[in-house]
Amino acid sequence: MKLKMLISTIFVVVLLVGCSEENKIEVNSSIKKETREIKELVEDYSARTITAKSASITSKQLLVTDNNGNEQAYELPKDEFFVSIAPYINETHPCENHSLTGCQGEMVSEQFDVYIEDTEGNVLVDDTLKTEANGFIDLWLPRQQSFQIKIEHQGKTVESEFSTFENDGTCITTMQLI
């Protein structure tokens, strides 16, 4: 009798653990899907392949007002921070939180050599990147960190620092190439 109870108890525990792991997999898949969808939505607004009355991005949310005036807020990934950088030579504008539908950088569809490392010397970006139709380079970086960045374009360079803490802006328009 005791052996049957022991076997029954073990069976129930194994069943519960299996269900728990299955739920974790489903939740993780759901989070990954939502993250991918948010990133694609941001990319579409930046590339101007979709439009809205307004779309802006803070450190926590993508805020969209459609052409009918309906507002929608999308939570950003918990471990990634969106930042949009508009390198410039002659013209810029002040900006804190990036307007995907309003901000316009000077250098549209230009290629830049971009190098970004964290405070421990880990290289996060070392690539040639192209600005979108809005003149910005969009990046998703780890949250709660500080970074060194170097941008080069046709013999001109800018080096700067920025960070991805909760109250940091998502729009960087202060990087003048000289």
Image (spheres, grey):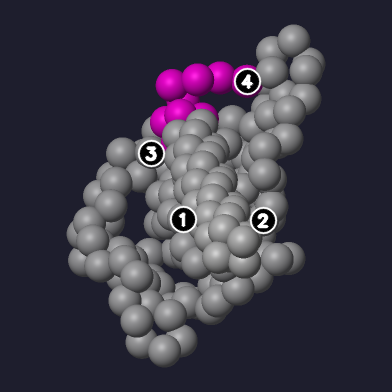
First in sequence: mark 1 vs mark 2: 2
Q: Tag 4: residue type?
A: Ala
Q: Nearer the viewer, residue 17 or 127?
A: 17
Residue 116 at x, y percent in the picture: 36, 72
Q: Secondary structure at mark 4?
A: loop
The secondary element bearing badge 1 is classed as strand
> Between tags 3 and 1, which lies in front?
1
Residue tagged by mark 2?
59
Q: Position of residue 178 (x, y in %)?
A: 36, 69
The mark found on residue 132 in the picture is: 3
Query: How far separated are the C-alphas under marks 1 and 2?
Result: 11 Å
Q: Residue at x 37, y 77 (%)?
A: 117
* Residue identifier under label 4: 52
User: Is 177 positioned to the left or the right of 69 in the image?
Assistant: left
Return the disc, 1 or 4, that comes first in the chain's sequence.
Answer: 4
Three-letter amino acid code of the residue under disc 3: Glu
* Label 3 – label 4 distance at C-alpha: 17 Å
Single out the residue that lies furthest toward the front: 1
CB atoms of marks 3 and 1 within 8 Å: no
Q: Secondary structure at mark 2?
A: loop
Q: Residue at x 44, y 54 (%)?
A: 139
Element on which disc 3 rests: loop
Q: Please say whether residue 164 is one of the residues in the magenta stretch.
A: no
Mark 3 and mark 2: Cα distance apart in space: 20 Å
Mark 4 surroundings within 10 Å by alpha-carbon count, few (fewer than 14), some (14 through 19), many (20 or more): some
